[in-house]
Amino acid sequence: MTSTVSPESAARFACRASGLSDRSLTQLHQHATSVFLLADEGVVVRVSPASQQQRLKTAVALTRWLVANDFPATEPVSVPQPVTYEPYVATFWRHYPQPQDGAPPTGRLGTLLRALHALPLPPIPLPQYRPLASLKNTVESSTYLEPDQRAWLTVRREELLDAYGCLDFPLGHGHIHGDAYPGNTLWAHQDVRLGDWDEAALGPREIDLANTFQGVRFGRTPGELDEFSQQYGYDIRRWSGLRVLCEIRDLHTLGSYIRRADRGDIAAAQQLAHRIETLRSRDGQARWVAA
């Protein structure tokens, strides 16, 4: 039976359940997560698949701890959350209005990650980082992928997992953001905050650095990468494992596009086809766009 619940209706239900008025609810954007703004409340509502409930509970608890320890994470709102309304789950976050003159510089993320990795282990149970864990089910259950695409993605995932298992990590293991890249930073007046903590985990520190370098596919410049490395205090380009982590990130980014293509999103399907084609041809210089 097909669900008739939309992300918006789930957001409105969750608002009312948490004591917030949904009168000013408007959609900001939709990708892996549907994001809404409650302008009257100064609150952002993020609506995710209900399968993410435990991870979102962890994200809310972790960011409350981080804020209490003076780390500039995006701040969860003090309301009962997360709220489940099948097949979705909603969380509530303080809204940080962004200026029109550009996102935070890439180097600011390096500063944030250096501070994050210097913190003691949080008193919140974090899952172990498992690369490409969710992609397996996404690929197998997809109604959009062609059989040859599905077969190639399955083989490529296994190849990368084998390569990952052979890596040594000079920075060691600890708590990581898991999805750290400049797009998850936000201005908070003159300060910068780090958001989107759904993939927080225990894992190699290099995971939090590699995603920024994978961003060359989106136009990130050598100068930005130099500044990021300088602010973090380590240049991951000196480590031979960077290529494997960037290729894992390449494949990881396909998951949300596959799910959107399954729902009939034409723009997502076109970008997905382009990404798979360039990966299969090993075109490391091909530019991707966030569709």
Image: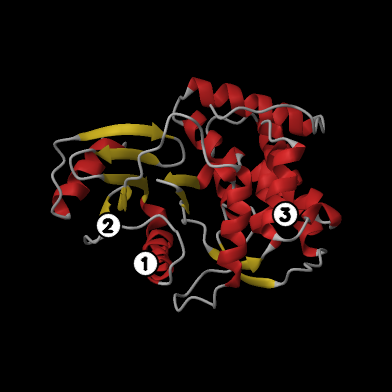
**Given the image, on which type of amino acid does mark 2 rest?**
Val
User: Between disc 3 and disc 2, whose residue precedes?
Assistant: 2
Residue 64 badge: 1
Horizontal and vertical percent position of residue 104: 53, 42
Q: Tell me the SS state at disc 2.
A: loop
Up/down of 274 relative to 159, above or below = above
Distance of mark 1 from mark 2, alpha carbons? 9 Å
User: Between disc 1 and disc 3, whose residue precedes?
Assistant: 1
**Given the image, on which type of amino acid does mark 1 rest?**
Arg
In this picture, residue 99 sits left or right of residue 289: left
Q: Tell me the SS state at disc 1.
A: helix
Task: Give the quarter of the image for residue 22.
Answer: top left
**Given the image, on which type of amino acid does mark 3 rest?**
Gln
The answer to whether one can see residue 228 in this image is yes
Measuring 48% from the left and 30% from the top, which residue is drawn there?
101
Horizontal and vertical percent position of residue 107: 63, 48
Task: Give the quarter of the image for residue 11.
Answer: top left
Up/down of 272 relative to 69, above or below = above
Q: Residue furthest front?
A: 190
Determine contact: label 1, label 3, CB under 8 Å.
no
Kindly report which numbered mark, 1 or 3, lies closer to the viewer in this rendering.
3
In this orientation, which residue lies closer to the viewer: 149 or 256? Answer: 256
Residue carrying label 3: 230
Residue 218 badge: none
